[in-house]
Amino acid sequence: MSGIIVDGVTYDLPWVAVTEKIDKLYKYAERNEAGTLLSELIGVFYNFDVQIAESAANPTDYALFWAMLKTAKTSYQITMPDPSGDLTYYCYFSNIQHGLIKQKGTTNYFRGLSFSIIAISPAVVPA
């Protein structure tokens, strides 16, 4: 997979690091007096921590992607890599940050764009 695809738009941004996390969320989870876990699983969620860089071939995509991240939308369709093939699902972005590394005239240079991708719905639900 080349670049990052959000809402059908491909941003030409190289991946620096991608960490896929499998989160199991529960309606409740508690232990009884015997120590046995009693729980009700809501589902399995695919979440990611991502770092991306600017593309030397297409430097405007970084600014476009940053502008997209700053919108007030609460849901985005994203396509992410997975060992079983690309995953396409709805998410929101969290923990968005990057750092200014240099100013040259009126141009700002940023690096270290990182964010979390949080699934809105479970990918797998209990049978």
Image: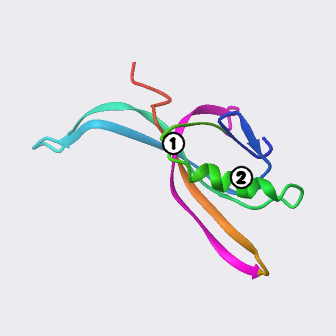
Q: Is residue 85 left or right of residue 38?
A: right
Q: Residue at x 73, y 80 (%)?
A: 102
Q: Is residue 35 above or below residue 49?
A: above
Q: Residue at x 74, y 61 (%)?
A: 53
Which disc, if any, is residue 73?
1
Dot 2 or dot 1, earlier in sequence: 2
Which residue is labeled 2 in the image? 64
Question: Badge 2, how many Cα within 10 Å: few under 14, some, many 20+?
Answer: few
Mark 2–mark 1 Cα distance, whole angstroms, equals 15 Å
Mark 2 secondary-structure assignment: helix
Q: Is residue 80 above or below residue 122?
A: below
Residue 26 in the image: state x and y as whole percent. 31, 37
Q: Is residue 73 above or below residue 67?
A: above
Indicate the quadrant where residue 28 lies. top left
Mark 1 secondary-structure assignment: loop
Q: Which residues are magenta?
A: 80-103
Indicate the quadrant where residue 58 lies. bottom right
- Which of the image's four quarters has the C terminus? top left
Whether residue 15 appears in this view of the structure is: no
Amino acid type of disc 2? Leu
Residue 83 in the image: state x and y as whole percent. 68, 38
User: Is residue 14 inside the magenta stretch?
Assistant: no
Q: Is residue 97 left or right of residue 74?
A: right
User: Is residue 102 inside the magenta stretch?
Assistant: yes
Q: Residue at x 65, y 35 (%)?
A: 7
Amino acid type of disc 1? Lys
Residue 9 in the image: state x and y as whole percent. 73, 38
Residue 50 in the image: state x and y as whole percent. 62, 55
Question: Badge 1, how many Cα within 10 Å: few under 14, some, many 20+?
Answer: few
Q: Residue at x 57, y 56 (%)?
A: 115
Q: Residue furthest top?
A: 127
